[in-house]
Structures are given as structure tokens and as C-alpha cells.
Image (tube, rainbow, N blue to C red):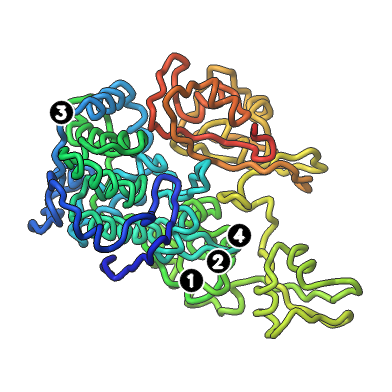
Amino acid sequence: MRVSLYVVVGGFALLTGCQTLDNHGINQTEVEAVTTENTVPEYYLATEAPSAQITDVWERIRQGMQLPVPDQKLVNQYRDWYIKNPQHLEIISERAAPYMYLIVEELEKRHLPIEIALLPIIESAFDPSASSASAASGLWQFTTPMASHFGLEMNWWYDGRRDVPASTTAALDMLEYLYDKTNNNWLYAIAAYNSGESRVLNAIKRNEKKGLKTDFWSLDLPSETERYVPQLLALAEVIKHADEYGITLAPISNNPSIEVVDIDSQIDLAMAAGLANMTTLELQKLNPGYNRWATSPLGPHTLVLPIDKSEEFKKALAETETEDRISWLRYTIKSGDSIGKIAKQHHTTINAIRAANGMKNNTIVAGKHLIIPVDAQDKQLYALSTQQQLPKKSHAATESTKIAYQVKSGDTLSEIAQAHKVTVKQLSVWNKLGKSDKLQNGQKLVILAPKNLEQTAQIRTVSYKVKSGDSLARIASKFNVTVAELLEWNSLAQSQYLQPGQVIKLVVDESKLNA
């Protein structure tokens, strides 16, 4: 759907973490009156790239690049930073592997600049579960109002901002909208994705009134936006010439690696993982939009699966009755119960209980029975991927279960410890690891996972965009973590200079954040 169908009614402002749709002070007549200096191509109408001859998506991106990269101070600074820190893009290129083909396909289908595929590197470091301090979330960093405006569903069960296929569609819809609003200038549109169309259009108007140039580089914009566009262009330049700059990007097959499968009903994620012959952790990594142990009762009824697992899954799903896809509990209503209390007790919602029991209101009667959807397996065994599912610190554990964990590319001891509710020290002792020992891809670790946890702290992974004047120590103090943890989570050196606009990852306890 073309975004020109969207209408933003006067004064309606929507905010994302790095993005706004902000029309305060600008009416339609003023917008139409803006003249712009178009310094970049309009929609790309060239023939599609000969993808059959390209085996690596990065090469496909290189061949499709068309945005000019000017000799500008900030562009050069960002280019130099990426060149001096090659491990940053090397790590991100691995994270991008499941999704980059899907994004590039959608961009080419819409004839949009291929460089837009690089925006998630700036926004979230290609982490679909990333959250920012300004309440933006997902690969494309949408806030709730903006996500809702562009059609993403968000509820107790599901957050479309973290659903990569859905949020990609919304982000490209938004960029098309901004391109139309900014008189078909891609640098303006990309800047507006960061700070809002009204700021860009107002800056253009101010320069026009003063008789000044109105190209992007001449506009007076927020400092973050003035850095945002140069960072994208520098990133494009570095990726285009990665070999010359000594940067190794993990190859991404120029073929689909994931498929969005319609499951037509709610399903327990543990059961879905079993039907696909996957672990629950593997399934949830591809489906971080689901907040709970199951997909949403009211939809979307879709799952993202590896392409080599999808047919096996669809066949097994067809042999599974709809009523068997969720486990059910028969609950006897007690005196003093309320439907809200029962829902909270069983980690579900009032609406889910009402839907399961055909109830028209919240009235319940002691002694009667309710059917309650529950998770098929112990929650301690579930992978953790959202604010509700992320690791919780514990004060006590009465038992422990021995687990064999296989290290995956990009894993750190800290992240593995957080995911299994243990400490790095415990992991080191159980596996006889020294301080200087490095984890190897495929290495087996022994974990004594605690049961019956008393959960108290609220841990979540966030992405933080470095500001001018920030240092590792200042950021560590702000989020109540250590500099050593920052270095480990982001593969940084102690002496490494932080670049404004750089996105770093933190695992924080929200209950202990400094004011």
C-alpha cells in the first residue's frame, strides 16, 4: 500500500525513539509551497538487479547503491570511525543474516533506495529486541504511537514493533510517506525519519526566507539529525568498499532464509518449536514480537520460521487439532476470586479467559469452573526475549536442573548467565573457565539452572545511542552497570573512543536505574 493514502490531521504528532511525524505549525498549503533542492534520485525505476548472478546480499546492496556520498566533515568522521572499528560491522553483519534478504527484497519491490537496508544498523544494531531509553523498540525503533499509526499491533500478547517482517513493512510505509511529504528528496525523508517532517520542512522554510540554500547540508536541524544522515551515507560508503577498508562482512545468501507461516490459530510456542524440530529459544529469537508463552489469541496468527524448517512445521501443524495447540487448565472458582485475580495467577489475560469460556462479562460464581489457557511447559525452561520474558534476578532457589548449553556465535558469558538466571562466576566455576578464556562457537557449557525462583528484579536489554560528551564510565553509571560489562557486551576495548550516534547494547535492571 502506498503511504500517500495516509492523512495526518492538523496538529497530530506521533513520536518514535529517533523518529517523529510532527505537523505542528505547518498546514497543507505551507507544505505544498516548499521548494527543495533535489540532490538525490527519486524512486528508483531502473531494472532490478540481476540477483540470479549474485550470491551474497551484501554484493546485491553494493550494486544497488545510488545515493551520492559527498565530501562532508561528518560523513568522513563516521567513515573513519567504522574503518577504525571493523569488529562493529563484523558483529552486526552476523545479526543481520536472517533478515537482510527480506528487507532488500521489499526495498527493490517498492523501488526504494537500497541504502535504507542499512538504517537498522544505526537504529538498533540489527537487534529486533532492542529497546531505547525513549521507549522505542524493535529493529526500526518505533514508539507506540508511531507504530500504531503505521498499522503495528501491540497488546499484552504481542508487540509488532519487534516482529521483523511486520515492522519492516511499517518502516518502509513511513519512509514512503516522508518522501512524499518532503517533496521527493531522500535526504530530507531520511532526516525526517529521525526527527520528524515538521522540523525538516520548517528548516527549509527558514532558509528560503533568508535566501539561503535549502539542500540538507545547509539546514539547521537538531544535532542528532545532522549526524543521522551522514552516518547512513558513511555506512553505505564503508560497506560498498568493505574489502578495501579491511572489513569482513559475514556473507548472507542471496536467497530467502526465513518464511512467514500462517498458523490460523493461537499456539503454544514450545509446541510450535517442537513441531518445527527447533528449540524454543531458536523459535523465539525469530519471533521476538510475542511477549508471552503463546501467540496472541486474536492474532496475528503467524510465525517466522527458518526456510528449511517451514515445510516440516506446516505438515506437522496440519496433523495437530486446533484445540490441541494450547494446553488448558480446569479451574474451580473460589470465594473471593475475581477474573482479574485468576488471570494474573495463571499468567494470562481477562480477555483470554473470557474468550475461552464464551463469557460476555467478568461475572464469575464460586464453585463453578473456568477453562484457562496455560503454557505447556515450565516457564523456567522458556527462552526469554521481551520485557516480560527477559531474565529476572533471583534471591533464592530450592533446586537446580543440569542443562547442556551449546555456545552460539556472538554469545558472551554475561548474556548466557542472564538468560539462565545464574552468575558469570557460577558459569566459570562449573565449566572451569579462567578470566582470559574465550568462548568458542559450538563449545558445550554445563549450567545448573535454578527452579522455584523468587523473581524480583526487572532485567531487559536496551540499545543506547551515544551522545556528545558520553564516556564508558558515564554510561555505566547512568545504567548502574560496570565499564567491564559494557566492554564485554559490545566487544569494545578500554581505550576505544565512543562516537556520538553509535549504538551500544546494555543489559539493565530497570528497578535499579539511576534517576
| Residue 504, horizontal then vertical, whole percent | 46, 33
Label 3, label 1: how many angstroms apart (C-alpha)? 48 Å
Please, which residue is most extreme toward the top here?
A: 495
Residue 305 in picture, x, y percent from top left: 42, 60
Mark 1 residue type: His
In terms of secondary structure, where does tag 2 sit?
loop
Give the residue drawn at x 67%, y 71%: 327
Apparent side of residue 314 relative to residue 50 in the rendered image (left or right): right
Q: Which mark is residue 295?
A: 2
Residue 461 is marked as none
* Quadrant of the image occupied by residue 356: bottom right
Secondary structure state at the residue bearing disc 4: loop
**Of label 3 and label 4, which has the lower sequence position?**
3
Q: Which mark is residue 292?
A: 4
Q: Amino acid at mark 2?
A: Thr
* Amino acid on which the number 3 mark rests in the picture: Asp
- Residue, disc 1: 301
The kind of residue tagged 4 is Arg
Question: In the drawing, what numbered circle is on residue 71?
Answer: 3
Q: Are marks 4 and 1 in contact (CB under 8 Å)?
A: no
Q: Can residue 292 be seen by looking at this rendering? A: yes
The one nearer the camera, 353 or 380, is: 353
- Alpha carbon separation for disc pair 4 and 2: 7 Å
Secondary structure type for disc 1: loop
